[in-house]
Image: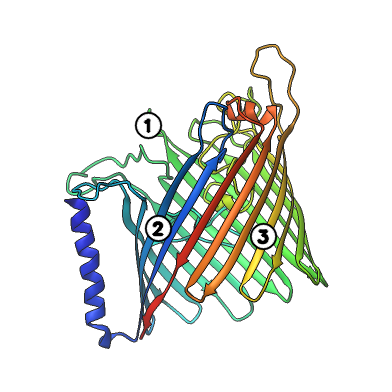
């Protein structure tokens, strides 16, 4: 009943907005229907000889309403995420995800300063640490408040924060603020600074997140400091990033971790070619301190191979630790026509920490984890209809199997097809 009531309320809100459109300065209504068929034969982790491939279709459906009048802006985005066939044809219960993806109000305090409050995306720079996770059908959004400053010199500064609490909070919440049972921070604060000068971009980020331990309600705070920059030198664009993490993790262990990334892109007449390396520190199986860098709220699918073996809801490590990653990659994107392109990338993965053989007393294994090759064909059929087709293959070594905790096959693969229908019904 609660799900049905939520749907009725949201649909009624949209109809009310449409019915009173004459009073709005600007109103737009848009939608997105995005089904994706996937063939998984070693996606996220190695497949054993006994396991059979998975195949399914998952679909995201969104309805977006935007309103702007003078200094005020509002956005409501509702979504339904489901796997085809997850419900009976005639049903009263629905296991799919139906929720409010974004719902915020924004007010322009001055010509340079605005405040945004509510459920919203946090999507900064290349989405390495803070990203909207758009590849995942459910996406990622935060409940919070942020101040946004921007001027005409190319300088921008955002500051935000959040405080999360368990449901139900009202009317029974009369004492205590324990927050647990959810994979999320209890509280967070961040500051982002950005400056553009000609062909140079520079950003700095500070992020403080606190998580609460269930056993004694202690809140442990972890801090992440990051700087990144890009600079164009003729036909070559150089980019670099460095992040450091300190503080405490949820287990109360001291965190000392870092990420370093360098890349160079050369624009040829045929296609841009990018060569780069990412280094994410990790923890050895017997470390008492947490030395593993965690890209907490980023869009990790975009960085460490499309097959999501690293940092995408699955562990790679031993004895409960995260082993870290060295990713040396080559990327390119061929333009096949006015509306289509073919992306290709090759990754070589290494472990920055010792990989131990599963048998006690056996010698350490090689640091080489394997290689992955990714292809993605993209075709913009029309302004509101897009087709993407992808294929990836990963060669896993014995060391990869040890970090995944599974003795599997050497060759793993993944294929997918995604259609995106994204029309704007009207803008008034």
Query: 245 or 415, which is in the foreground?
Result: 415
Q: Residue furthest top?
A: 361
Circle number at residue 269 = none
Q: x, y (%) of residue 148?
A: 49, 69
**Residue, disc 1:** 214
Mark 2 and mark 3 lie on one chain; the one further toward the N terminus is 2
Q: x, y (%) of residue 76?
A: 34, 68
Query: 376 or 126, which is in the foreground?
Result: 376
Residue at position x 76%, y 59% in the image = 274
Numbered disc 2: secondary structure: strand
- State yes or no: discs 3 and 1 in contact (Cβ < 8 Å): no
Numbered disc 3: secondary structure: strand
- In this rendering, the label closer to the viewer, 3 or 1: 3
Where residue 18 sits, quadrant-wise, is: bottom left
Residue at position x 61%, y 43% in the image = 245
Mark 3 and mark 1 lie on one chain; the one further toward the N terminus is 1
Could one spot residue 143 in this view of the protein? no
**Residue, disc 3:** 343
């Amino acid at each position: 009943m609660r799900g049905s009531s939520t749907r009725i309320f949201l649909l009624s809100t949209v109809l009310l907005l449409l019915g009173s459109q004459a009073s709005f300065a600007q109103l737009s209504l848009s939608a997105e229907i995005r089904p994706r068929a996937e063939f998984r034969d070693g996606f996220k982790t190695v497949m054993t000889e006994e396991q059979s491939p998975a195949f399914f279709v998952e679909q995201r459906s969104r309805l977006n309403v935007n309103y702007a009048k003078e200094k005020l802006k509002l956005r409501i985005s509702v979504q339904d995420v489901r796997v085809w066939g997850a419900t009976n044809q005639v049903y009263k219960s629905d296991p799919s995800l139906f929720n409010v993806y974004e719902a915020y109000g924004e007010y322009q305090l001055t010509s340079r300063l605005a405040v945004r409050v509510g459920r919203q995306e946090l999507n900064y720079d290349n989405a390495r640490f803070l990203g909207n996770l758009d590849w995942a059908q459910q996406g990622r959004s935060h409940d919070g408040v942020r101040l946004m400053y921007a001027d005409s010199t190319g300088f921008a500064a955002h500051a935000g924060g959040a405080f999360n609490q368990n449901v139900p909070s009202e009317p029974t919440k009369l004492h205590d603020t324990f927050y647990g049972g959810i994979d999320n921070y209890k509280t967070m604060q961040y500051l982002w600074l950005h400056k553009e000068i000609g062909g140079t971009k520079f950003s700095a980020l500070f992020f403080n997140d606190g998580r609460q331990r269930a056993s004694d309600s202690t809140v442990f705070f972890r801090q992440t400091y990051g700087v990144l920059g890009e600079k164009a030198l003729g036909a070559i664009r150089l980019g670099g990033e460095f992040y450091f993490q300190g503080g405490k993790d949820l287990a109360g262990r001291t965190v000392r971790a870092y990420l370093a990334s360098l890349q160079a892109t050369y624009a040829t007449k045929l296609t841009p070619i990018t060569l780069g390396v990412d280094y994410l520190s990790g923890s050895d199986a017997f470390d008492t301190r947490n030395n593993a860098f965690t890209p907490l709220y980023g869009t990790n699918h975009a960085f460490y191979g499309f097959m999501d073996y690293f940092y995408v809801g699955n562990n790679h490590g031993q004895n409960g630790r995260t082993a870290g990653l060295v990713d040396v990659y080559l990327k390119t994107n061929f333009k096949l026509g006015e509306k289509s392109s073919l992306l290709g990338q090759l990754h070589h993965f290494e472990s920055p920490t010792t990989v131990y053989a599963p048998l006690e007393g056996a010698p350490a294994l090689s640091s080489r984890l394997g290689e992955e090759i990714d292809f993605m064909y993209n075709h913009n059929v029309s302004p509101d209809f897009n087709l993407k087709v992808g294929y990836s293959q990963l060669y896993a070594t014995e060391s990869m199997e040890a970090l995944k905790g599974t003795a599997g096959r050497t060759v793993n693969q993944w294929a997918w097809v995604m259609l995106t229908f994204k029309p704007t019904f009207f803008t008034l």
